[in-house]
């Protein structure tokens, strides 16, 4: 089961990377719009709230604002993790 799960994760990761870095803006924005619309129809089977973040990532993948916010979030998370690790009592 783990091998199937890893294979699926790898396939989905490759697909998302390919969608985010597609050279045609028209294709990327079209797919983003479809994912956002599908996310708004979350109450239907198959479609769901999981589609909203995918659509937003596709829409803003090459936006400098997205990368700035992402960099800040990663820095904040790393600092928080380091602070938490320093606060653990020694054994």
Image (tube, rainbow, N blue to C red):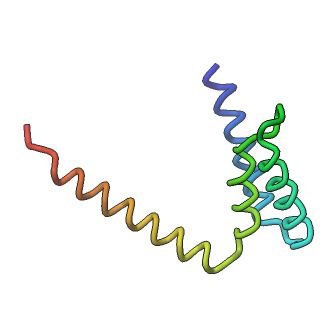
Q: Nearer the viewer, residue 62 or 33?
A: 33
Looking at the image, residue 91 sits to the left or right of residue 72; the answer is left
Please tell me in which quadrant of the rendered image residue 41 appears. Answer: top right
Q: Is residue 59 above or below residue 10?
A: below
Vertical arrangement, residue 6 with respect to residue 42, above or below: above
Q: Residue at x 83, y 35 (%)?
A: 44
Front-most of residues 62 and 51: 51
Q: Is residue 56 above or below residue 39?
A: below
Q: Residue at x 65, y 25 (%)?
A: 3
Q: Nearer the viewer, residue 34 or 40?
A: 40
In-image side of 66 versus 83 (left or right): right
For residue 65, side relative to residue 23 (left or right)? left
**Quadrant in the picture for residue 76:** bottom left
Q: Position of residue 26 (x, y in %)?
A: 92, 71
Q: Nearer the viewer, residue 30 or 44?
A: 44
Determine which quarter of the picture holds residue 27.
Answer: bottom right
In the image, what residue occupies the spot 10% across and 43% down?
89
Tell me the residue at 54%/77% (across/down): 68
Query: How many numbered discs sit on the rendered protein?
Result: 0
Most distant residue in the bottom direction:
64
Picture coordinates of residue 58 (x, y %)? 75, 62
| Quadrant assignment for the N terminus | top right
Q: Position of residue 73 (x, y in %)?
A: 46, 65
Residue farthest to the left? 91
The C terminus: image quadrant: top left
């Amino acid at each position: 089961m783990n091998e199937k799960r890893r294979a699926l994760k790898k396939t989905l990761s490759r697909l998302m990377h390919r969608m985010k870095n597609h050279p045609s803006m028209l294709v990327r924005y079209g797919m983003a719009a479809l994912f956002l619309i599908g996310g708004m129809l979350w109450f239907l089977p198959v479609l769901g709230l999981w589609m909203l973040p995918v659509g937003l990532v596709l829409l803003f993948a090459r936006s400098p604002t997205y990368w700035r916010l992402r960099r800040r979030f990663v820095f904040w998370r790393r600092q928080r993790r380091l602070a938490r690790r320093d606060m653990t009592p020694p054994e």
